[in-house]
Image (spheres, rainbow, N blue to C red):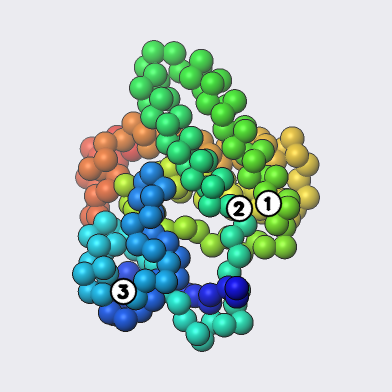
Amino acid sequence: MGKTSMRLAITKSLSPGARLGKNIYNERGHILLCEGLTLTQKMINRPVSLNIPFVYIQDSRTDDIIPMPPVSGKLRREAINMIETTFLDMKNKMNLDGSFTIEQANVKFTQIVRNIMDELKRNKELMTLLADVYTYDDYIFTHSFNVTLYTLAIGMELNINNKNLEILGLGAILHDVGKMLVPLEILRKPGKLTEKEFEQIQ
């Protein structure tokens, strides 16, 4: 079965009749809208209401572009779920015993980094790095995974050795962990932050 060609489209610009090119997932990795669906206005309203800024749609004009995922959907879901549970655990324990929490997190995150590295090495020629579309509520966890994926892919292209790749990957996973202590209403605020809100982020 041939691969379906697709392109990225701004969700708010979609028109009924477009065919979805990739699944849209919720924060648990469950499918909200399936690849191949012909979109109605009601279906389009759903990702718009969930603050999903873009989706992939099928487009015959991109037939010469063959999208291939660099890592399996299974690894992506497992990694994002582990990032979420570990970040939440770290958030709950940060004021109690931060060093022990970080040590536990490093063990889990090192395994995620190694799993991503293994799959990237097997699929090195597939460096298209298309991101799956998730709801905005899952932004921190999905973003942390995607940054780790891109960082490791670039590191491998630069021939960085495995030990340094692991360190690089850990830094990528943890780059946004501080946002776990920022209230959601500030993280999701569409407008300019007040001075007090900016201080909270700092």
Residue nearest the observer in this picture, 133 or 192: 133
Name the image quarter holding residue 108: top right
Q: Position of residue 106 (x, y in %)?
A: 57, 27
Which residue has dot 3 on it?
Answer: 39
Q: Which mark is residue 196?
A: none
Q: Residue type at mark 3?
A: Leu
Residue at x 40% of width, y 20% of height: 94
Element at label 2: loop
Position of 187 relative to 1 (above/below): above
Element at label 1: helix
Which residue has dot 1 on it?
Answer: 120
Residue at x 62% of width, y 33% of height: 111
Q: Residue type at mark 1?
A: Leu
Q: Is residue 148 left or right of residue 114?
A: left
Distance between the alpha carbons at the discs numbered 2 and 3: 27 Å
Badge 2 or badge 3: first in the primary sequence: 3
Residue nearest the observer in this picture, 183 or 101: 101
Q: Circle 1: is it few (<14), some (14-19), or many (20+) Cα within 10 Å?
A: many
Disc 1, disc 2: CB below 8 Å? yes
Distance between the alpha carbons at the discs numbered 1 and 3: 33 Å
Q: Which mark is residue 71?
A: 2
Position of 179 relative to 129 (above/below): above
Q: Residue type at mark 2?
A: Val
* Residue, far bottom: 61
Quadrant where the image shows the C terminus: top left
Quadrant where the image shows the N terminus: bottom right
Q: How many marks?
A: 3
Distance between the alpha carbons at the discs numbered 1 and 2: 7 Å
Q: Position of residue 36 (x, y in %)?
A: 42, 71
On the question of residue 183 being in view, the answer is yes
* Residue, far front: 1
